[in-house]
Amino acid sequence: MGFTQILAWSSTFYLPAVLANLIAKDTGWSLTLVIAGLSWGFIVTGICSPKVGRVIEQFGGRKALSISSIFFAIGLLCLGLSSHLLVYYFAWTMLGIGMAFGLYDAAFSTLGRLLGQDAKTAIVGVTLLGGLASTIGWALIVFLEGLYGWRITCFILALFHLLLGLPLHYFLLPREEQSTEAHAKELNSQTNLHKGGNRLFMLVAVILTVQSFVVATISVHLLSMLKTIGFSVSTALAIGMMIGPAQIIARLLEFSLFKNLHPSWSSRVGVLISFFGIIFLFTDGYVLALLGAALYGAGNGILTIIRGTLPLALFGQEGYATRMGLLGRPIMIALAFGPLISAFILEKWGINILLIILTALVFIALLGTLKLPVQQAEKVAE
């Protein structure tokens, strides 16, 4: 699953970073329209996420993740063939459905169903490998594009999903006992009631969604924000490169030293670290900015794990996949609209206002984590 997550993230979320300019130059479309394809994909993912959660709850993750490989392949094939914007956005629609069936939420849901409360170690392991997607994916896509061009690169990535991802998902993941339709409907009904009436579920949703908005904003606008503050391009790149290794180190620590720490405490630590990271990151000082990037990266690395472990710890294995699907919708919408809203704020009011908004949002998330309980799922349910 760690390997297939590298493949999934590399060929979707990280794809435009390498190919967007090339696609725009080749087709004559504006760069904004090309990059907006990813935003549209996230919107589709958010729309589909609750349904995917219910599918995993009823049929298990093996079938859902196998379906993701097929949709990824179709989307990449259409992307490589796209000579009209309608085809291009259809490709991202297919990729968006694939992301709903195949990114972290689906992987975490599968692990939660298979391993129950013991899934934390496996979830951390998957995020450790998934964290390599940008490094491996960018290098692979740059290499392929240099040899064959961006269209053939998309075709090759589609083949990877069909010849590697699909067999790994279908033949190596354990089969799960299929839930009866009546049992699945009962679980979905209970979970939807939980979503509507349980303040704790809504609190978790707000924390994760707010943090996703901030992460999406910084991921897209980091270099331009650092250049606006006064850093050179090379310095801004050096600062930004601290984030990836810090994420990996934080996940390794979560995997080893802090593996018994309750996810509620981990979320407090993760949000607190990222809060100070943002404050230091955008200061007019190289050393402080490096420290800020490291802290922000470490906090984000922890919070990626929390997205899977916190709902499992608080609400238990029963209905876990459905809850992950419900949580996925606002998170994906935040990922889709975060960069667009932030770009508008940057253009209209400048970087200082955007930084105030980002730090305020993270502070709200921090206050939210202080209200998270540390009881076992059974006690929380009571």
Image (tube, rainbow, N blue to C red):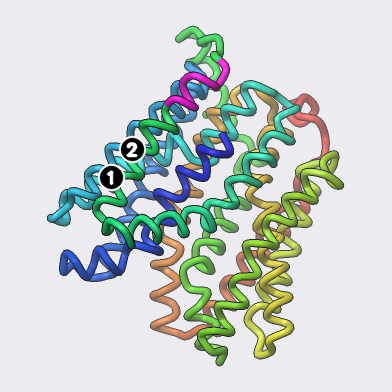
Q: Quadrant of residue 268?
A: bottom right
Count of picture labels: 2
Q: Which residue is drawn at 24% across and 49% down?
A: 79
Q: Few, some or many C-alpha atoms within 10 Å of disc 2 (few <14, some 14-19, many ≥20)?
A: many
Q: Residue at x 73, y 84 (%)?
A: 287
Magenta residues (range): 167-174
Res. 204 visible in picture: no
Percent position of residue 147, x then y? 31, 58
Instruction: Work out whether 314 lies above or below 178.
Output: below
Which numbered disc covers residue 259? none
Q: Disc 1 to disc 2, how far (Cα)?
A: 6 Å
Instruction: Work out whether 280 lies above or below 258.
Output: below
Q: Which residue is drawn at 46% across and 59% down?
A: 138
Q: Is residue 171 magenta?
A: yes
What is the chief secondary structure element of the magenta stretch?
helix
Percent position of residue 95, x then y? 34, 43
Which residue in the protein does label 1 denote? Answer: 155
**Of 217 and 161, which appears nearest the observer?**
161
| Mark 1 secondary-structure assignment | helix
Which residue in the protein does label 2 denote? Answer: 159
Q: Do the numbered discs 1 and 2 sit on residues whose CB atoms are within 8 Å? A: yes
Q: Quadrant of the N terminus?
A: top right
Q: Quadrant of residue 63?
A: top left
Q: Mark 1: which amino acid?
A: Phe
Residue 147 placement, left or right of 259: left
Residue 146 placement, left or right of 116: left
Residue 344 placement, left or right of 5: left
Q: Quadrant of the C terminus?
A: top right
**Of 37 and 7, which appears nearest the observer?**
7
